[in-house]
Image (cartoon, rainbow, N blue to C red):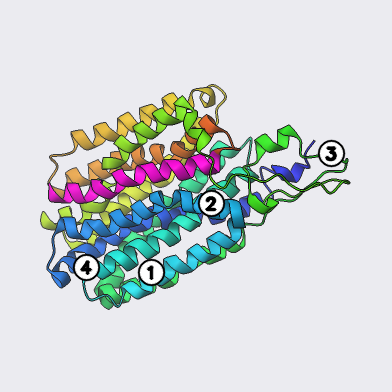
């Protein structure tokens, strides 16, 4: 049997969970929170809604589309080195963006470079979280996913405050410094070490418990014969043979066309309706605040014995709830109506965020999760890229 440390469901796993919480917060909240700068950027570069929405879309597309690159690097070098490099890229992109003189430069710096950096942090953090938790995995995923709303609640008003005091360039520079915390989170992703007392190879149980990591960085299985670990594929396309995964990809591609549109365009829309800047930025904080409670609560519910076997149905309900929230609130123009929309959107968005990766892991298992996640995010990147700018045109 594997050493208990192979899936501790606690111990250092809680520190890993904290790091995953921070990484998830920056990865998902930052592309939305940056929208508080859009009004100023529109004036600075004489551009419109769609032009500024491309910044968030490129970040999200890089976060999604760089999945295979992240998978290959993780399988070759391990999670910790990849996350450290990603942290420096995310920070460097925003620092360089503060010196931009046109919108295209922002696309390349704040969009491509920062987005790539966040991608190299996000996927490895999920893999490490899945390695450290087994029985408590739904709860751990829910708690880690809560990083997104917590950071959204904080980064949105902080961004408006930085904009008011230092302008958009100063705000970008300070934000670049904050993103260096991704490096600290990468440093705490300590690889699991599993030493077998008997002279046997890794048991089948262990193989199913933990995702593959190249170089055996996350799993070091030793035996008396000193057998070399078998060579692993850098990216396993065989997971696409799973019909359940294909259905999941189709559903998510449709969903992400509009999933991020409200959070990216809401602040500018509110400002155009005459809502004061600080109150408009606070709308994202409302979404984040509701989301804070929705994600861990959803994770706890998903852990129940009679819910977990039917996780895909629970996830479908969350997607339906989110879509109906948008449809029913599309005509709101006053601040009160926007606040009500934010409450229900935060609840439904939190449910989707808490369940999406748990459902994916349930479909492909831990052994195929790294490759499946990379491929899923790559395919979804196209929808993420065209969604918000298209909505901006509308």
- In the rendering, at what x and y percent does residue 82 appear? 55, 60
Label 2, on which residue? 72
| 280 to the left or right of 207 | left
- Residue 55: x percent and y percent? 27, 60
Q: Quadrant of residue 191?
A: bottom right
What secondary structure is marked by label 4? helix
Residue identified by numbered label 4: 103
Callout in the foreground (4, 3): 3
* Span highlighted in magenta in the image: 369-394
How many angstroms separate mark 4 from mark 3 (CA)? 59 Å
First reached walking from the N terminus: tag 3 or tag 1: 1
| Precedes in sequence: disc 2 or disc 3 | 2
Residue 391 in magenta? yes
- The answer to if 155 sits in the magenta stretch is no
Please name the residue that numbered disc 1 is placed on: 93
In the rendered image, residue 116, in percent from the top left (x then y), is placed at: 42, 59
Cα distance in 3D space between marks 2 and 3? 28 Å
Which mark lies nearer to you, 4 or 2? 2
Question: Is residue 175 visible in the rendered structure shown here?
Answer: no
Residue 378 location in percent, x, y? 40, 45
**Mark 1 Cα within 10 Å, few/some/many (few <14, many 20+)?**
many
Tell me the crowding category of disc 4: few under 14, some 14 to 19, or many 20 or more residues within 10 angstroms, Cα based: many
At horizontal 21% and vertical 52% (from top left) the residue drawn is 265
């Amino acid at each position: 049997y594997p050493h208990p440390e192979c899936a501790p469901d606690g111990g250092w796993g809680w520190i890993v969970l904290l790091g995953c919480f921070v990484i998830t917060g920056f990865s998902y909240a930052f592309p939305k929170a940056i929208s508080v700068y859009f009004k100023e950027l529109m004036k600075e570069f004489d551009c419109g809604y769609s032009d500024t929405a491309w910044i968030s879309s490129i970040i999200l597309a890089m976060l999604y589309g760089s999945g295979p690159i992240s998978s290959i690097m993780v399988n070759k070098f391990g999670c910790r080195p990849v996350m450290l490099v990603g942290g420096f890229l995310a920070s460097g992109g925003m620092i360089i963006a503060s010196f931009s003189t046109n919108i295209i430069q922002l696309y390349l710096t704040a969009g491509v470079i920062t987005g790539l950096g966040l991608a190299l942090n996000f996927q490895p953090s999920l893999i490490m979280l899945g390695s450290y938790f087994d029985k408590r995995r739904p709860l751990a995923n829910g708690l880690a996913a809560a990083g997104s709303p917590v950071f959204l609640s904080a980064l949105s008003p902080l961004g408006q405050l930085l904009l008011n005091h230092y302008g958009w360039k100063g705000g970008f520079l300070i934000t670049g410094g904050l993103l260096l915390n991704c490096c600290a989170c990468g440093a705490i992703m300590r690889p699991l070490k599993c030493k077998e007392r008997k002279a046997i190879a890794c048991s089948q149980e262990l193989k199913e418990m933990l995702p593959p990591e190249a170089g055996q960085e996350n799993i070091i299985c030793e035996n008396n014969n000193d057998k070399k670990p078998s060579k692993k594929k850098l990216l396993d396309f065989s997971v696409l043979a799973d019909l359940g995964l294909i259905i999941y990809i189709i559903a998510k591609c449709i969903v992400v066309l509009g999933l991020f549109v409200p959070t990216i365009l809401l602040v500018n829309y509110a400002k155009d309706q005459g809502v004061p800047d600080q109150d408009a930025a606070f709308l994202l904080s409302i979404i984040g605040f509701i989301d804070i409670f929705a994600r861990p609560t959803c994770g706890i519910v998903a852990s129940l014995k009679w819910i977990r076997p039917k996780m895909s149905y629970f996830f479908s309900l969350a997607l339906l709830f989110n879509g109906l929230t948008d449809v029913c609130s599309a005509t709101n123009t006053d601040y009160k109506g926007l606040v009500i929309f934010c409450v229900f959107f935060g609840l439904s968005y939190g449910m989707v965020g808490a369940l999406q990766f748990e459902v994916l892991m349930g479909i492909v298992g831990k052994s195929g999760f790294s490759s499946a996640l990379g491929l899923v995010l790559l395919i979804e990147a196209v929808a993420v890229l065209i969604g918000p700018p298209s909505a901006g045109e509308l």
